[in-house]
């Protein structure tokens, strides 16, 4: 029997995360990801994912200091970012820059210190490239700011508001880890050959780049822009469903109830929205869409997915669509690294087999 795409195949044991798609739970190391996202900092969540326990105050401070110390770009990465073609895809740039970090200091077996370095430096690479492409001076990392705040600062050159910082931080925690997804699997396959951490996350970045994984919130952003005002929502969504089209940001392969990540992002969005009209519109569109999906697609269990609220909050913090997949990757870096460390701690090389469907040599050809 062939399991195309390895669907339904369990290929590892993991203590990092658990997804219950029927009940709508995402567990990070024994804690609801939703609770971690709403109550912890990026740094505390990344520590939990990497080390398996929430840090005490001393451990958190130590971890924050290590992350802060590793944010700066080495000169050869700056030179590289300055020379890569302007038209190069953002994810291709990130993959190339991360790959170029792979000097002799990264070797098998992978170490947590290497993971810290990668988690710390990824936002700096993204922000550096983003500003330089726009013809602006890069903003050096600011040691006074936490991980998410500093990322926003490096992107804009301005200190973000508390609401912007909290919104991005919540998103980054929720995007940090999601079981044996395609990019995580790639990272584990690469390290299973006793390759190094940089090679493993470079594989993961190449996998994340594909639209079936890294996605893009542009479908949702466009829908919200097309709707424009609350009073247009019902007619717009009904027309789409009447034409047999899909509503972007709804439905999920795994979650057959509310996606807990979308739930947490909605709660945070409501908390920080203030008088932001774009979030108000998103909340209304969500309500209408869920109601209409139940009417047009009864029993299909179609609820809001993470992409809907990712798009809504990114729009609220004035994030360019182009930053979505790189930011998703900067968040997932923690999950990838944790999986690579876990794989290496109990390694067996991945080597599935394939059923040959080509031709065989004719008898006369055989020597
Ligand atoms: C994510 C997705 C691919 C999951 O699909 P799935 O669980 O395999 O579900 P299926 O594609 O088998 O669809 C099952 C039924 O629900 C319908 N459906 C699924 N998602 C829908 C949506 N967003 N809008 C309208 N109908 C939808 C399908 O048309 C199908 O209807 P049918 O039984 O009448 O044929 C799908 O929900 C989708 O395309 N969503 C929109 C795109 C999106 O938001 N992607 C981001 C995911 S994070």
Image (cartoon, rainbow, N blue to C red):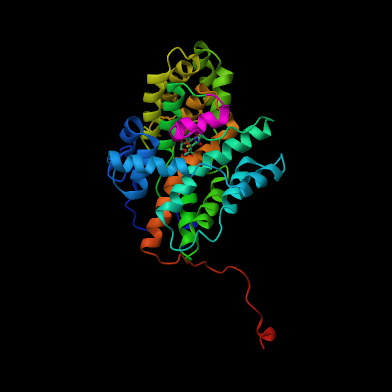
Residue 336 coordinates in the image, percent (x, y):
45, 50
Which residue is found at the position 50% from the left and 21% from the top? 316
Q: Is residue 137 visible?
A: yes
**How many marks can you see?**
0
Residue 28 coordinates in the image, percent (x, y):
33, 43
* Magenta run includes residue 226: no
Position of the N terminus by quadrant: bottom left
Q: Horizontally, is 231 left or right of 222 in the view?
A: left
Image height check: is 166 above or below 113?
above
Image height check: is 241 above or below 180?
above
Q: Is residue 11 visible?
A: no
Which residue is found at the position 41% from the left and 27% from the top? 166
Q: Between 332 and 146, which is closer to the camera in this rendering?
A: 146
Q: Which range of residues does the magenta coloring cover?
A: 142-158
Q: Horizontally, is 83 left or right of 259 in the view?
A: right
Point out the residue furthest to the bottom here. Answer: 367
Q: Horizontally, is 136 left or right of 206 in the view?
A: right
Residue 286 position by quadrant: top left
Which residue is found at the position 67% from the left and 88% from the top? 367
Which residue is found at the position 49% from the left and 50% from the top? 183
Residue 32 coordinates in the image, percent (x, y):
30, 38
* Magenta run includes residue 146: yes
Residue 253 coordinates in the image, percent (x, y):
44, 41
Image height check: is 75 above or below 310?
below
Q: Between 346 and 311, which is closer to the camera in this rendering?
A: 346
């Amino acid at each position: 029997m062939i399991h195309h795409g390895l669907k339904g195949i369990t290929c590892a044991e993991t203590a990092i995360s658990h997804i219950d798609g029927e009940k709508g739970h995402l567990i990070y190391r024994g804690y609801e990801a939703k609770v971690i996202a709403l109550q912890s900092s990026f740094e505390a969540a990344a520590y939990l994912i990497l080390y398996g326990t929430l840090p005490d105050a001393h451990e958190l401070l130590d971890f924050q200091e290590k992350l802060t110390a590793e944010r700066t770009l080495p000169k050869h990465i700056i030179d590289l970012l300055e020379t890569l073609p302007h038209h190069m895809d953002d994810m291709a740039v990130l993959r190339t820059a991360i790959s170029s970090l792979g000097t002799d200091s990264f070797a098998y077996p992978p170490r947590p210190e290497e993971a810290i370095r990668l988690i710390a430096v990824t936002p700096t690479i993204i922000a550096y490239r983003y500003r330089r492409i726009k013809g602006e001076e890069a903003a050096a990392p600011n040691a006074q700011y936490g991980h998410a705040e500093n990322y926003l600062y490096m992107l804009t050159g301005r200190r973000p508001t508390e609401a912007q910082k909290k919104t991005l931080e919540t998103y980054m925690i929720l995007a940090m880890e999601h079981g044996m997804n395609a990019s995580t699997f790639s990272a584990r396959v690469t390290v299973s050959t006793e390759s190094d951490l940089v090679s493993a996350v470079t594989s993961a970045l190449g996998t994340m780049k594909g639209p079936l994984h890294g996605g893009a919130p542009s479908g949702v952003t466009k829908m919200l822009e097309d709707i424009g005002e609350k009073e247009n929502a019902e007619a717009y969504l009904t027309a789409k469903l009447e034409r047999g089209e899909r509503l972007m940001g709804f439905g999920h392969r795994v979650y057959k109830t509310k996606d807990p990540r979308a739930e947490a992002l909605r709660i945070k969005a409501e908390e920080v929205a203030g008088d932001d009209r774009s979030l108000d519109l998103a909340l209304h569109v969500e309500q209408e869409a869920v109601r209409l999906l139940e009417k047009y697609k009864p029993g299909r269990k179609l609820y809001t997915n993470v992409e809907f609220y990712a798009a809504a909050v990114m729009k609220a913090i004035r994030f360019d669509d182009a930053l979505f997949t790189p930011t998703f990757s900067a968040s997932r870096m923690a999950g990838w690294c944790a999986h690579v460390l876990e794989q290496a701690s109990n390694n067996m090389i991945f080597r599935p087999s394939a059923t040959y469907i080509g031709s065989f040599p004719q008898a006369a050809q055989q020597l």
